[in-house]
Image (spheres, helix red, strand yellow):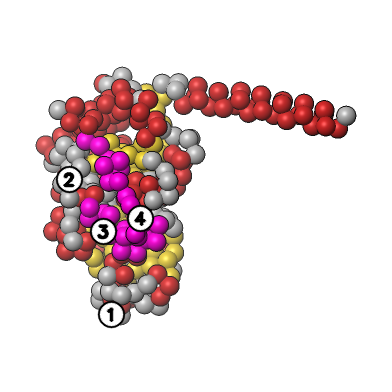
């Protein structure tokens, strides 16, 4: 009797699971594309909101919803859980995930360089003059397992300092990062614009390592480091090539807009809450960031190799593993966009 009841319950649960699974599949293919951004107000991810503001998603006949998580690693988790169809985050996650058996592909590259800087709190600037001085210090990152965490580990490892010799504290970005500096919770940390410009304006922090330009990135990492990008899971890509092509076209239009307009003109297209009461500072931060954006969305030559080299330098998941870089990105859709 108990066996029959248990069997009936299991059958009922399996049927229910099938219904839920089917409804989730229908929701995923409802026509709406949800893109999770690893911090939507970060300037490195500007193309996401700007594309929406310029109306390019609608021009392509796309129903896109933008959502935001404080760190790229949180956005990545949403993608792997099937809660969203795409992520605007750092390309390096596609390599890290492949080492863990997950197939993720970048289909548009926004940033040729990280667009980030390691900032040292002014009160710690006398003792931290380079990444060689971070032993015993507390370093801020957006989130554990985030790209800021990856790059922090690499820059320290370049000076022979292992991750066990300093502390890492996830402090997010924007105001939460600034508060962590002001309260002395971190001695230094990696962040993006406009947070960099805000800290420089108030004098709370100084630039220690600058990866906002090609020159600074090559000096710090040894080559171009393609960073902000649009990536999706390969199974979704294989069955949604039409949608992928439309997304690529929309974002390539935005990159062309960025490359043909001034920082002030671009800022005028953004919502007021992105720059608050200091639009001049936002425009300056944007001006500092313009060189990082790709003109065409294509993966820069040699970029994947640099990223793999950086990750292999400290990441045990990647080190010594065979990574098929050809599966981590594709120029197929941005090439069609031309």
* Front: mark 4 or 1: 4
Q: Mark 4 points at which residue?
A: 321
Q: In this view, does 284 lie to the left or right of 123?
A: left
Q: Name the residue under label 3.
A: 309
* SS of the residue under disc 4: loop
- C-alpha gap between disc 2 and disc 1: 37 Å
Quadrant location, the N terminus: top right
- Residue at left 14%, top 28%? 338
| Pointer 2 or 3: first along the chain | 2
Q: Is residue 26 left or right of residue 254?
A: right
Name the quadrant containing residue 156.
bottom left
Closer to the camera, 200 or 67?
67
Give the image location of residue 95, x and y in percent: 33, 49
Contact, CB < 8 Å: mark 2 with mark 4?
no
Q: Name the residue under label 2.
A: 300
- Residue at left 31%, top 75%? 160
* SS of the residue under disc 1: loop
Give the image location of residue 235, x and y in percent: 40, 32
Q: Name the residue under label 1.
A: 126
Q: Is residue 8 left or right of residue 125?
A: right
**In the drawing, what numbered circle is on residue 218?**
none
| Pointer 2 or 4: first along the chain | 2
The residue range painted magenta reads: 305-331
């Amino acid at each position: 009797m108990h066996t029959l009841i248990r069997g009936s319950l299991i059958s009922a649960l399996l049927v229910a699971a099938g219904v839920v699974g089917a409804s989730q599949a229908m929701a995923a293919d409802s026509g709406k594309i949800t893109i999770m951004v690893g911090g939507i107000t970060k300037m490195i991810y500007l193309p996401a909101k700007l594309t929406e503001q310029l109306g390019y998603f609608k021009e392509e006949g796309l129903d896109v919803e933008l959502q935001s998580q404080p760190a790229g690693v949180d956005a990545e988790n949403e993608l792997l859980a099937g809660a969203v169809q795409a992520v605007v985050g750092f390309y390096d996650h596609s390599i890290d995930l492949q080492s863990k058996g997950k197939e993720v592909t970048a289909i548009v590259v926004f940033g040729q360089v990280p667009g980030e800087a390691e900032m040292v709190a002014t009160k710690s600037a006398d003792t931290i003059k380079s990444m060689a001085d971070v032993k015993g210090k507390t370093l801020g990152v957006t989130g554990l397992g985030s790209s800021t965490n990856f790059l922090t580990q690499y820059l320290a490892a370049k000076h022979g300092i292992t991750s066990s010799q300093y502390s890492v504290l996830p402090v997010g970005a924007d105001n939460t990062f600034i508060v962590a500096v002001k309260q002395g919770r971190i001695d230094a940390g990696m962040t993006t614009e406009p947070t960099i410009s805000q800290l420089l304006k108030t004098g709370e922090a100084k630039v220690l390592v600058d990866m906002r330009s090609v020159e600074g990135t090559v000096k710090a990492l040894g080559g171009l480091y393609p960073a902000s990008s649009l990536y999706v899971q390969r199974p979704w890509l294989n069955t949604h090539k039409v949608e992928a092509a439309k997304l690529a076209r929309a974002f390539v239009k935005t990159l062309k807009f960025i490359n043909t307009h001034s920082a002030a003109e671009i800022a005028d297209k953004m919502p007021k809450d992105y720059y608050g009461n200091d639009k001049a500072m936002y425009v300056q931060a944007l001006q500092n960031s313009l060189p990082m954006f790709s003109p065409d969305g294509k993966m820069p030559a040699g970029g994947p190799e640099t990223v793999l080299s950086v990750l292999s330098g400290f990441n045990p998941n990647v080190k010594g593993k065979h990574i098929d870089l050809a599966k981590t990105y594709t120029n197929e859709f941005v090439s069609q966009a031309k």
